[in-house]
Image (cartoon, rainbow, N blue to C red):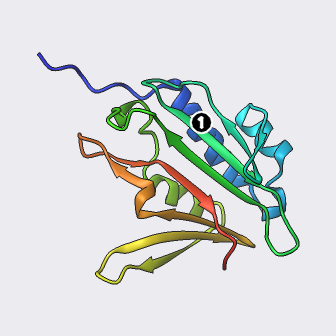
Amino acid sequence: MTSAAPQRTAAAAHAIRSLLDFLTKLTSTSDITLDQVGKQFGGTLTSEDGAFVYRSPDIGGGWNYGVKVFLPKPDMKAGFNFWFYNPDSAADLGAICELSLDALRQALLAHGYAEKFSPSEIGGVDWVNFVKADIVLTVTRRDVVMTDQGTQCLMGLGTTDAR
């Protein structure tokens, strides 16, 4: 008898809703603040390696998510990262597989983002940028993985300080 794949957890679904709500309401990088991100994700961000980070408690199957805020500097805009992580590299993605690149694309394009691709040297795409005002959200090939069942999962994304 084989065990069924873990169901997506309510906590993972909530994290993705919080992420999409945050990203779709951004009007510029000036909206990326410690207060705003802390309120959106329900946690206190602590200083870590020149940025501010919140790491969730376990949201199911040993999975957690993190958010990171980079405060603006004279030569850099404010920045934001979101990612799922699990100390067990063999952990089943089913518990957190809540968002595909296509679903992210639909949500962002519906809220004023434009999509720009960076083609790879051998065909395909190295990364996708979603651009709105001075916001550049980047999803790389490493940020999108496939489950054993063939479902596409977005594992993370972040802003880049480029245009």
Question: Is 124 on the left or on the right of 137, as rendered?
Answer: left
* The image quarter in which residue 35 lies: top right
User: In this orientation, which residue lies closer to the viewer: 78 or 52?
Assistant: 52
Answer above or below: position of 27 versus 83.
below
Q: Is residue 110 visible?
A: no
> Looking at the image, which residue is at 32% across and 35% down?
90
Question: Is 72 on the left or on the right of 58, as rendered?
Answer: right
> Looking at the image, which residue is at 51% across and 55% down?
104
User: In this orientation, which residue lies closer to the viewer: 108 or 70?
Assistant: 70
Name the residue at the left extreme: 1
Q: Is residue 15 visible?
A: yes
Give x and y (percent) for residue 108.
Answer: 59, 60
Answer above or below: position of 21 versus 7.
below
* The image quarter in which residue 80 lies: bottom right
Check the picture and name the quadrant holding the C terminus: bottom right
Q: What SS does tag 1 mark?
A: helix
Give x and y (percent) for residue 46.
Answer: 78, 39
Name the residue at the front extreme: 49
> Looking at the image, which residue is at 79% across and 33% down?
44
> Looking at the image, which residue is at 46% across and 26% down?
62
* The image quarter in which residue 137 lies: bottom right
Determine which residue is flagged by label 1: 15
Give x and y (percent) for residue 106.
Answer: 51, 58
